[in-house]
């Protein structure tokens, strides 16, 4: 189709002047219609309009399948404050938002340091041998569907036929036979967090590896000459210099952790023992698609969005308070 | 991933001799501490690698075991390796059908989002017009807010359009939600291309369509490839959108088919088929990963994440 429209007679004469006058030819009109207006229309209808509608629905008692929909103002939000199940879910989501990014970032920075600047202190600054291999392996979970990751680990954690208890009893911990990692209130959340961290570490390692490679090698050589050890170098040189990347990672990880829907749905679809792994997204999903309380569920969605934005804002605030960009150059 | 030197921070400086050549020149005390640190690093990294690989290997091996063998011991190797589990998963558990659905949905969505995303990114990058910033902010909103906020209204948008529980409905939704990321990434890519080439083409009489498809799009090929890989993985792994918007069992995609195993909560689950299903779901992404991991990691490195 492109060549046919491109040769329209109206477009042939004086193209330079035509561009200036912006006379609308069929070629240009059709191009803009398909390149701009069509995709934007689809995007607005299927992405933007649902976001906008959500704000309104959250203030109704809509049950979805009838036309009746009473405007109830902020009643849904007041109800959420007294909804024990939701509050439990909100606490769990908040816990995930704090623990998962922290642990993931610490591990990812440690691994990134080892594979870039943690090698022998003789010769040039470099990582340990085989660094490429470790990086390729650790990045792989990023590509695997989260639902599959959750299912695989649910199998590993399985009390009787699972790999974990098999290994533990194998090394003599017979007390761990039949221990339900995902079915015990003491371990369910920790075990679930481990899986989420496991799936993210490789991706953020690659992100930090790239950031560290952007640091001039002279800085590391200078630190080494001054007698800084590996840990000191990581804390005082690497972290301040890749600060922006750490902040970005914190926000992305926090958003993913607040959601956590797929992982939790794969490992404990019902919310875990005593709702110990139940999260806001699962509550929203059940409230909407099992109970049909669409207005109430949308209010949960609004809270989820607000929590996400507050989280991102908090990360920026902490970053600003603890020094931000200027300080970094000072350290360097 | 051939040479270690490629991975390291600053290959240009003196590490060409390798560790064995360099070590003798150092003082003994430094070398001992050095060796300990390097050895510890290796142990930790190796442990991490094992932790990543072992669950997959275990599932892969288990997928050839009978249900009795699976229940008997997590370590036993399949006595008589057979593909029965794969056959059961493919036909009885419906993985075959879900596989085809996934290929159709992801294939179509990928084609359209790359085409439309590239067109829009090009227009935004090359032409100045009123509304440019509005569009930019709309894209930002789509990337910022959680999909969960939109999911209920989206359900009714699709229902009113008669697209709920249909594959075309799922395709359109995938395209719409992958669109802002695609445009953002390609926007910066098109900005970096020389505009003189496009202007020269137009002076020579090429229209907008032809300039885009014959001149600009081929130049943007590396960027297109990176975005396409990210979109492929993102769409192949998509879970929430199909689970909420595509509840007709016949139209399930793979991730939904796998979730069905989870929702059966231990009862009457054909574990062998579950393992086989996992393997069949992972193999396509493994292939993509093996072939494209350099480009993938390179794109992460170049700041896909601003």
Image (cartoon, rainbow, N blue to C red):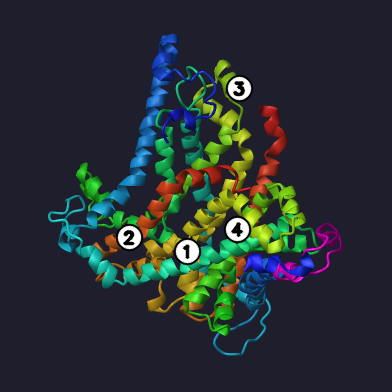
Residue drawn at (67%, 39%), measured in percent from left and top?
A322
Any part of residue B180 in sight:
no
Any part of residue B210 in sight:
yes
Q: Where the N terminus of chain A falls, by quadrant?
A: bottom right
Residue A53 % position (x, y): 65, 76
Q: Chain of mark 2?
A: B
Residue A218 % position (x, y): 60, 22
Q: Which residues are magenta?
A: A12-32
- Horizontal side of residue A6 vs B271, given as left or right: right
First reached walking from the N terminus: tag 1 or tag 2: 1
Residue B87 % position (x, y): 23, 67
Q: Residues within 10 Å of mark 4 (few under 14, many from 20)?
A: many
- Tag shown at residue B182: 4
Q: Residues within 10 Å of mark 2 (few under 14, many from 20)?
A: some
Measure the C-alpha gap from mark 2 to mark 4: 28 Å
- Horizontal side of residue B192 vs B55, given as left or right: right
Residue that numbered label 3 is attached to: A218
Measure the C-alpha gap from mark 1 to mark 2: 16 Å
Q: Chain of mark 3?
A: A
Residue that numbered label 1 is attached to: B238
Q: Are the residues at dot 2 and dot 4 in contact (C-beta closer than 8 Å)?
A: no
Residue that numbered label 2 is attached to: B280
Q: Chain of mark 4?
A: B
Q: Is residue A197 above or below residue B260?
A: above
């Amino acid at each position: 189709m492109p060549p046919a429209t491109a040769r329209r007679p109206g477009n042939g004469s004086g193209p330079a002047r035509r561009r200036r006058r912006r006379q609308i030819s069929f070629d240009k009109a059709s191009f803009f219609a398909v390149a701009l207006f069509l995709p934007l229309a689809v995007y607005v209808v299927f992405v933007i309009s649902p976001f906008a509608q959500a704000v309104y629905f959250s203030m109704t008692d809509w049950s979805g399948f009838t036309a009746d929909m009473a405007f109830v103002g902020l009643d849904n939000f007041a109800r959420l404050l007294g909804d024990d199940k939701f509050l439990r879910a909100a606490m769990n989501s908040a816990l995930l938002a704090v623990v998962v990014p922290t642990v993931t970032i610490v591990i990812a920075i440690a691994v990134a340091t080892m594979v870039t600047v943690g090698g022998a202190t003789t010769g040039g600054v470099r990582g340990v041998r085989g660094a490429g291999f470790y990086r390729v392996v650790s990045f792989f979970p990023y590509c695997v569907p989260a639902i599959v990751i959750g299912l695989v680990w649910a199998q590993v954690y399985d009390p009787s036929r699972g790999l974990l208890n098999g290994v533990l009893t194998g090394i003599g911990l017979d007390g761990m036979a039949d221990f339900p990692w995902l079915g015990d209130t003491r371990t369910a959340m920790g075990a679930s967090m481990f899986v989420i961290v496991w799936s993210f570490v490789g991706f953020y390692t690659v992100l930090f590896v790239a950031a560290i490679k952007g640091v001039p090698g002279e800085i590391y050589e200078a630190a080494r000459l001054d007698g800084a050890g590996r840990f000191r170098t990581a804390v005082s040189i690497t972290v301040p210099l890749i600060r922006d990347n750490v902040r970005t990672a914190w926000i992305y990880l926090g958003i993913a952790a607040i959601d956590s829907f797929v992982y939790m749905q794969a490992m404990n679809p019902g919310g875990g023992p005593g709702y110990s792994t139940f999260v806001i997204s699962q509550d929203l999903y059940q409230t909407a698609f099992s109970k049909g309380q669409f207005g109430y569920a949308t209010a949960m969605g609004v809270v989820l969005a607000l929590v996400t934005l507050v989280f991102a804002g908090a990360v920026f605030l902490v970053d600003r308070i603890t020094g931000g960009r200027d300080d970094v150059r000072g350290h360097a | 991933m051939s040479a270690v030197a490629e991975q390291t921070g600053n290959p240009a400086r003196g590490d060409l001799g390798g560790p064995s050549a360099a070590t003798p020149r150092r003082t003994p005390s430094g070398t001992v501490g050095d060796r300990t640190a390097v050895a510890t690093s290796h142990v930790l990294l190796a442990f991490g690698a094992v932790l990543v690989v072992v669950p997959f290997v275990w599932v892969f091996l288990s997928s050839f075991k009978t249900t009795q063998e699976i229940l008997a011991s997590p370590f036993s190797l399949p006595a008589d390796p057979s593909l029965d589990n794969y056959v059961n998963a493919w036909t009885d558990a419906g993985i075959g059908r879900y596989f085809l659905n996934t290929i159709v949905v992801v294939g179509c969505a990928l084609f359209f989002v790359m085409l439309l995303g590239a067109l829009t990114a090009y227009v935004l990058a090359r032409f100045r017009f009123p509304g440019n910033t509005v569009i930019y902010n709309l894209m930002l909103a789509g990337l910022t807010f959680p999909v969960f906020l939109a999911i209920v209204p989206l359900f009714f948008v699709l229902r009113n359009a008669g697209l709920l529980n249909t594959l075309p409905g799922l395709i359109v939704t995938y395209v719409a939600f992958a669109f802002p990321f695609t445009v953002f990434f390609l926007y910066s890519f098109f900005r970096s291309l020389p505009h003189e080439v496009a202007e020269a083409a137009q002076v020579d009489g090429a229209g907008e369509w032809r300039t885009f498809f014959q001149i600009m799009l081929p130049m943007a090929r590396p960027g297109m490839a990176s975005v396409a890989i990210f979109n492929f993985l993102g769409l192949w792994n998509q879970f929430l959108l199909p689970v909420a918007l595509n509840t007709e069992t016949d139209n399930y995609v793979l991730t939904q088919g796998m979730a069905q195993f989870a929702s059966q909560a231990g009862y009457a689950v054909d574990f062998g088929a579950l393992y086989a299903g996992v393997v069949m779901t992972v193999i396509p992404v493994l292939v993509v990963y093996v072939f494209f991991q350099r480009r993938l990691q390179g794109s992460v490195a170049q700041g896909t994440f601003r």
